Image (tube, rainbow, N blue to C red):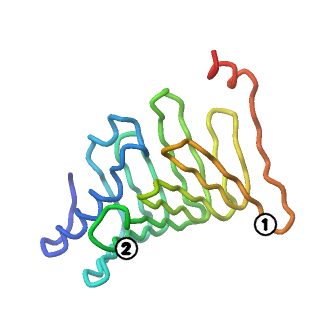
Amino acid sequence: MKFKIKKPLQSLVIAHLVFVISPPVLALKSDVNQPVLINSLKQSVDMQHNVSTFTYDVVIQQGTIDIRAAQVVVTHLGDDQGKTYIEAFGDPVTFYQIQDSGKPVKGHAQKLRYDVFPQLLTLTGNAYLEQLDSNVKSDSITYMLQHQQIKAISDKGKHVTTVLVPSQMQEKNG
């Protein structure tokens, strides 16, 4: 991995990255073997509370995964990977990934949260998720990565909007 981090902070930041950014369900199988690169204009680490904060033009890349945000906070609570989560904030936070099928998935929201266990990705605030021309829009989209299940919810009487393209559905089933 390539990082430009002062030596006293290096082990804490690298530990956060190993626990958080490399779960296999987030990426192509080959993505998890790729180096993780985080670029930001500013970063800070609170070693007492196990929190790393990256701010200003944050770009996280690992293989085909590309996440862009104004701020990313990585929090590790306890000794196991299941108590680690990432929160990304922006106007909007964007992400892009190529699935094992070769199809791209992209989306955006005001906030993205990834809980390592139970492998839960939550997009909130003008959430949008797209694969090819099919998409879903709502106030909140929850994606259970391991089970490949999506739940979309809108607030205050608004509707969830979904666009499905029949030809793409047939390609998946055919």
Q: Are marks 1 and 2 in contact (CB under 8 Å)?
A: no
Image point (26%, 47%), residue name:
35
Which residue is denoted by mark 2 in the rendering?
53
- Which numbered tag is attached to residue 84? none
Image point (42%, 65%), residue name:
85
**Disc 2 residue type?**
Thr
SS at badge 1: loop
Q: Is residue 165 left or right of residue 172?
A: right
Q: Residue 63 is drawn in which quadrant?
A: top left
Task: Tell me residue 68's x, y (percent).
Answer: 48, 57
**Disc 1 residue type?**
Asp
Query: Residue 21, relative to residue 10: is it above or below?
Result: above
Closer to the camera in the image, 157 or 34: 157
In the orientation shown, which residue stands out farthest toward the left?
7
SS at badge 2: strand
Which residue is denoted by mark 1 in the rendering?
155
Q: Is residue 31 left or right of residue 95?
A: left
Which part of the image, by quadrant, shows the C terminus? Answer: top right
